[in-house]
Image (cartoon, rainbow, N blue to C red):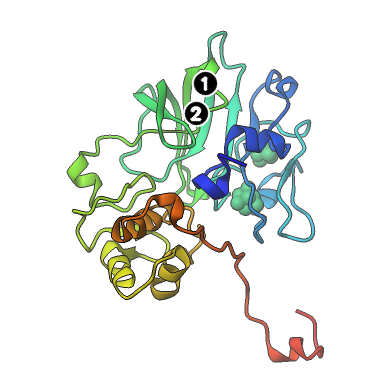
Amino acid sequence: MKGTILENGYPSIEELKNAHRFPSEERFQKGPVAVIECLQPIPCNPCENACRFGAILVGEPIINLPELQEEKCTGCGMCVASCSGLAIFIVDKTYSATEATISFPYEYLPLPVKGQAIKAVNRAGEVVCDGTVTRVMNVKQNDHTPVVTIAIPKEFSDDVRSMQRLNVAPAEKDHECCADYTYDPADPDDLIVCRCEEVTVGDIRKAIAEGADTITGVKRRTRAGMGLCQGRTCSKTVSKMIADAKHLSGDKIPLDTARPPVKPVPFSVLAGDEDI
Ligand code: SF4
Ligand code: SF4
């Protein structure tokens, strides 16, 4: 299917709806509700534990995709900052006659302030409309994951999922590690591409020069893509770097092999002497 999370690094709305990962329009019309855009079966369930209303079900096995029990969701937003994949949003289509609000995790500095005009972006990070910040929640329990709420024209409420970063001059931006970074051959070697494993442009260039011609090949040599986000942030950049170096188009670079994290187990478990 075109436009999938595996192709683009983010899910399309069609993919989310086809996978029954979107609240019903009837529920949207009742007030704020969580939209869980988590489509990869990895062992993860902090969202389930964060919801004291029992509105998120992961259950057993832990690689189940989270299910929203939309009738139980109050739209309280406690699950947003708990999601390590930054995949949960609160959408309020009842905010006003013309506007909806979107609440999303925002781990960049500077933080916006209430009342500030911003550019709202879609899942691909493209600007789709203007918006206004209505709330910034940066409490200790969120463990450095502020949750920003913006008001936007209602017609964009299924598309907008974040906001453009603030006050970042292009030269400074290229020297930060950020999810919206696009590879430029002029980039310095010390620029970080994989935030989780702190792998730099120079590390990846070296791996490609040594013969890595796939995302998996770069991963094996550098650990890029092995961290918590499992390549969500860096895979597209690594793919572009390989394509540039090999003079290929990006779609000729094989996709990364998605692997859920595993944990070490003692030999006694493998021998059947004890349970995990
Ligand atoms: S918004 Fe609140 S009630 Fe709804 S799923 Fe998240 S934590 Fe539960
Ligand atoms: S990535 Fe987020 S939404 Fe998905 S299972 Fe983990 S905590 Fe829940």
Q: In x, y percent, where is residue 5?
A: 56, 46
x then y, percent, for residue 234: 41, 56
Label 2, residues with CA under 10 Å away: few <14, some 14-19, many ≥20: many
Q: Are marks 2 and 1 in contact (CB under 8 Å)?
A: yes
Q: Residue at x 30, y 35 (%)?
A: 166
Q: Is residue 97 left or right of residue 208?
A: right
Question: Quadrant location of the N terminus?
Answer: top right
Q: Give the number of the disc on residue 243.
A: none
Image coordinates of residue 223 in percent, x first then y, are 43, 70
Q: Which residue is mark 2?
A: 160
Residue plotted at (59% across, 28% down): 91
Q: Quadrant of residue 239?
A: bottom left
Q: In which quadrant of the rendered image does the C terminus lie?
A: bottom right
Q: Tell me the amino acid under the disc marked 1.
A: Phe
Work out how far the residue at label 2 is from the one at label 1, CA to CA, in angstroms.
6 Å
**Residue at far top of view:** 97
